[in-house]
Amino acid sequence: MVAITKRLPDDGLTEADVEGWLDSLPPAQEPDKRAQLVRAVHATLDAFGNENERTGQQLVLYILHVADLLVHFELDDETLTAAVLYRGFSAGHFSEQELDDTYSAVIVKRVHDLARIQRLTPGVLAAREEEGEEHSENLRRMLLAISNDVQVLLIILAERVHLMRRLGNLSPQKQKQFSRNTRDIFAPIANRLGIWQIKWELEDLSLRFLEPEAYRHIARQLEERREERLAFISETITVLEKEFGKAGIKARISGRPKHIYSIWKKMQRKDKDFSHIFDVRALRVLVDTVSDCYAALGIVHSLWHHLPKEFDDYIATPKANLYQSIHTVVVGDDGKPLEIQIRTHEMHEHAERGVAAHWRYKAEKPARFDLR
């Protein structure tokens, strides 16, 4: 999950907070583009003042939280600037001429795309009553058709993440409407982009409001078994590090974060209780090369019995969003299942950041993909 930023307050934004956030940004690669971002931040602050967003948060602070999420994905300053500007443009605070005179053509194009999405797809960006996969797919296609600039879609997804983090401030009816919308439209778009961090967080937050009892039950089960699980993971990592070392495999091994929605879905699909779900105990192994992936897999399978029906080789056959990894489930020494994912560092970068991993260094050229 994208960690909640500590660089901005939840309420009561001050000028010092704004300057502190700007100072905390990574060093500017191109000073003129950083200057445009600074100008946009101050212009937005002047435009909206103390106006509040629907969740009750100061609108400028809400906008900066969204921009800070984009910083996590190492997006360029032009993308951050578009994210900061577009609400002011949509509200009529900034004119076409002002945009053209002050900001780059890339920024202006993204602002126009974002404003068009806001204007033409209220059924996507707002809470909706309609349900059904066909309706959801139509809305997803509409959103994707308006702009195939991936940076624009990342802005929309970042906005949705921040909204969902603050959803507790809205009425129960709105919570469920926005959560259905998020689960059915935004999480699948994040999946198409291969941005697992956003997908998982949106799904978990949606489940929290749509199935609160199930969410609390799984969270409680995870917490109750936390010490036992961590001890098992630590012992298993020690075993693997020793065996990998003997084989000359340099690996980074860690416990994999648990995603409540994923556990819940498998419980529903397989009609199993919590104790039979493989996601509960999981490891991730990162190595340098593809050959190391298969060598590591061989060692894992030599140590423990694996379940053939739970084996997937997404390196040999990547997913449609280019995700690559080996997934295997083995039965540990205690007779309980353990899921292990094995991938290269490069594959992991893609798994965490999706398409952003391929274009975040190419600030001059917008990334465009056929996502429909």
Image: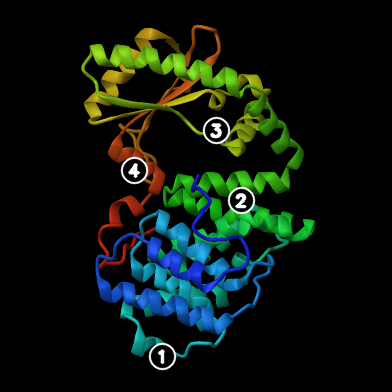
Local packing at callout 1 (Cα closer than 10 Å; few below 14, some 14-19, many 20+) is few
Mark 2 highlights which residue? Answer: 183
Amino acid identity at mark 3:
Lys
From the viewer's side, name the closer residue of 316 and 242: 242
- Does residue 196 appear left or right of residue 109 in this picture? right
User: Which callout, 1 or 2, points at the residue further toward the start of the chain?
Assistant: 1
Quarter of the rendering containing residue 297: top left
Mark 1 highlights which residue? Answer: 98
Q: What residue lies at 23% left-to-right and 14% top-to-bottom? A: 247
Between marks 1 and 4, how big is the CA–CA gap?
38 Å
Mark 4 highlights which residue? Answer: 349
Residue 258 numbered tag: 3
From the viewer's side, name the closer residue of 97 and 228: 228
Q: Position of residue 289 (x, y in %)?
A: 22, 30
Q: What residue lies at 36% left-to-right and 32% top-to-bottom? A: 325
Can I make out residue 141 in this image? no
Secondary structure beneath dot 1 equals: helix
Between marks 3 and 1, how big is the CA–CA gap?
47 Å
